[in-house]
Amino acid sequence: MGFLTNKKALIVGVASNRSIAWGIAEAMAKQGCEIALSYQTQKLKKRVDKCAALCNSNIVIECDVGSDLSIEKTFTKLKSHWDNFDILVHSVAFASHEALDGNYIEVTTRDNFATAHDISSYSFTALAKAANPMLNDNGALLTVSYLGAIRAIPNYNVMGVAKASLEANVRYMAAALGPRRGIRVNAVSAGPIKTLAASGIKNFGKLLDYAVNNSALKRNVTTEEVGNVAAFLCSDLASGITGEITYVDSGYSVYDQGPNL
């Protein structure tokens, strides 16, 4: 009997079985949670269907987080399966390929700045707003961030600025949702992982290698490890934790190997 038994979670952002969202879904399912997954486009539906089957779920719903109408339809469809649920996971980010290659000032435009913030940050608020009538008291919301929110990472560019917005979003949403209904809002900041989304960042392989050499554990993390922490944060075991950014990065964010003494 897992620590998420009798809980229900909607996980937004699964693109394949290599995505962080899938690692979260898998970890939650192992702890007894009932899972619903969303997909953004028909192109991704078959992949998400396969992931849902691995979680023993038959709830797969289209959701374009860039559209309020699509988000509204997502929860209307979810209502046909569940009267209420406990956990909402947001694992969605996007910036144009051109914005993730080169000097930040030179490649950032008004349009790609707005798009990155809309999809990567505001969508978490939009999902929470639409989910709120169905969320149980003492429920949990979770999103996924990265160190680029607080450090300038080469080529991460506008996505780092959007992740900084997302982390601020976590704190404001925690303050908004906690007092009346006890709903908690947190984020995991994952170390670099080779996912479909990460492939759009120039020289991402070098980031992976650098993280290994400059982390306390001398290795990168896995989607499974990120998923386990996410499952904990959304469980009653973490009932006193809200508004927090929890790093799952082999200690990279706190480790400075210093000079070779």
Image (cartoon, rainbow, N blue to C red):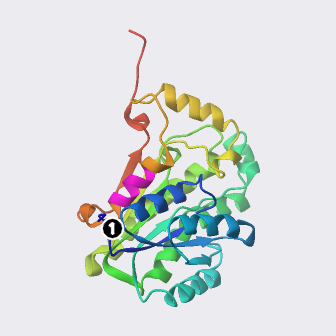
Q: Which residue is mark 1?
A: 4
**Residue in front for this viewpoint, 180 or 84:** 84
- Give me the residue at 49% from left, 60% from top: 166
Disc 1 residue type?
Leu
Q: Which residues are magenta?
A: 226-232
Q: Is residue 58 among what the camera can see?
A: yes
Magenta stretch: includes residue 85? no
Percent of width and height locating residue 203: 68, 35
Name of the residue lying farthest toward the top: 261
**Residue in front for this viewpoint, 208 or 43:** 43
Magenta stretch: includes residue 231? yes
Q: Is residue 171 left or right of residue 71?
A: left
- Give me the residue at 53% from left, 61% from top: 91
Percent of width and height locating residue 24: 47, 59
Percent of width and height locating residue 18: 59, 52
- Give me the residue at 64% from left, 47% from top: 198
Q: Quadrant of the image for the C terminus?
A: top left
